[in-house]
Image: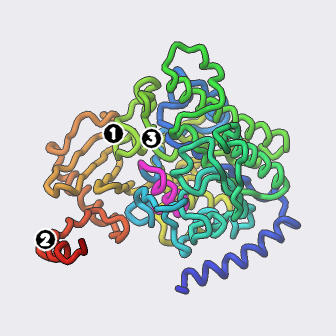
Amino acid sequence: MNRRIFLKTIAAGTVSLSVSKSLRADPIKNKTNIIYILADDLGYGDLGCYDQKLIKTPNIDQITVEGMKFTQHYSGSALCAPSRCSLMTGKHTGHCYIRNNKPLPYEGNLPIPAQEITVAEIMKKAGYVTGCIGKWGLGFPGSQGDPNKQGFDRWFGYNCQRLAHNYYPSHLWRNADKVILEGNQNKKKNQYSHDLLTKEALEFIQKNSNHPFFLYLPYTIPHPKLQVPDLGEYADKDWQDNHKIQAAMISRMDKDVGKILAILKKLKIDNHTLVIFTSDNGPHGAAGTLQKFNAAGPLRAKKGTLYEGGIRVPMVARWPGKIEPGSRTEHISAFWDVLPTMAQIAGIDPPADIDGISFLPTLLDQNSKQKQHDYLYWELGGKQTVRKGDFKAIKRQSPPDTPVELYNLKTDLAEESDIAAKHPEIVAQMKKIMLGAHTESKIFPLLKKKPQPKNTEKRRKNTRQRPT
């Protein structure tokens, strides 16, 4: 056991005591509840408050009326697993453990190591009851990356992100127990997973309404498959079926966000609960939905790319009495800022080795106190991206002589005009940042090693010796 795992284990023991004390003696009036809702593959242009014209999202839109809209917020990556790893650990993809999706031959995903400190562990240490309900994707059941081993007291949902593609799964997980969904056996398909996640979330809020809680709610909507129990208000639209389903899925999630906001008011904990809604990456674009709904808004490309459409995401926040209603910010922030923000709200120091900067001053309209990033950095599948100020550079590592692309996002949000040739000094600066921001990963190397040539002579010899 290395030193960090030992300290983490000791901290967990201390935390369990502090949580039990908080349940008895630390009323919620001294703590702010936090609900962090994460949509899956929801684009920058998929919400009414970000100029969506066809899909109705009145409840999420209302958050911006009563709270704050971020216009320059970024996901941790352009894909599910690395984005979630960045969110949980406060590190960008040049430093975090999981930097790409990596399938395993069994249920579950590559686990984050035991020594990683997650936002859930931070909140748990501060005396919060912690819950994760939805799609995890950071460790197979029982592994060191299991949600219950990464700071969550209560866990319910999909452990494996591949299984989360199906909204009528055979089972979900509640802590270490596999919950068999009998209604989905034999192709009956009458237990829609999203509805089960919302039910569980409402129960978690109800149960912990007298105590400080942190609820991480990573929904699976609108990630394909495109499945929904009913088409709702879109049933009679003169649209393709998949377009109706996509719209109905997003509006269904919006209604459930409304249920969450309603229960906070009913329980009279509305005024000391921060609700954040965002997405894990850009839109999936399946079945022509990117074009039909202008899902990326004014941004270029979609999920899987490091252009703005793949990584810039909607984010809205509501915190009555703290966030100015109807406010809007252009503060440049990213997923790795969430951990230090939550830590600051909880009154606890974050780990020293993270990349994030708290955006709490922005939420509180204390802009003079808001620290700024010198740059933001991403890497994915042999590509690197840096945003520094208004400029953004993209570099492909293979072939090695591929020119760097450079865009001025202030004048060219759609990334249509590559200005690298006009600004060699900025390109050189961006390359230097890319070099310094990247630490090598054996599991996710930035450059894939070339395959070794096969020993054909040895292969022929082995073939001759094979029995006939």
Query: Dot 3, how many residues are within 10 Å of its Cα: few (below 14), some (14-19), or many (20+)?
Result: many
Q: Which residue is mark 3?
A: 282
The dot on residue 409 is 1
Q: Are marks 1 and 3 in contact (CB under 8 Å)?
A: no
Predominant secondary structure in magenta?
helix
Q: Quote the CA–CA distance across marks 2 and 1.
A: 52 Å
- Indicate the position of residue 284 as horizontal and vertical percent values: 44, 38
The image quarter containing residue 233 is top right
The dot on residue 341 is none
The image quarter containing residue 92 is bottom left
Could you tell me which residue is drawn at 20 percent across and 50 percent down?
A: 404
The amino acid type, in three-letter code, at marker 3 is: Gly
Range of residues picked out in magenta: 78-91
Could you tell me which residue is drawn at 53 percent across and 45 percent down?
A: 165
Q: Residue furthest right?
A: 24
The amino acid type, in three-letter code, at marker 2 is: Thr
Q: Which residue is mark 2?
A: 456
Image quadrant where one finds the N terminus: bottom right
Q: Residue furthest front?
A: 468
Taking the magenta stretch, the answer to whether it contains residue 89 is yes
Give 100 or 124, whichever is nearer the viewer: 100
Side of 296 relative to 314 (left or right) = left
The amino acid type, in three-letter code, at marker 1 is: Leu
- Looking at the image, tell me whether mark 2 or mark 3 is earlier in sequence order: 3
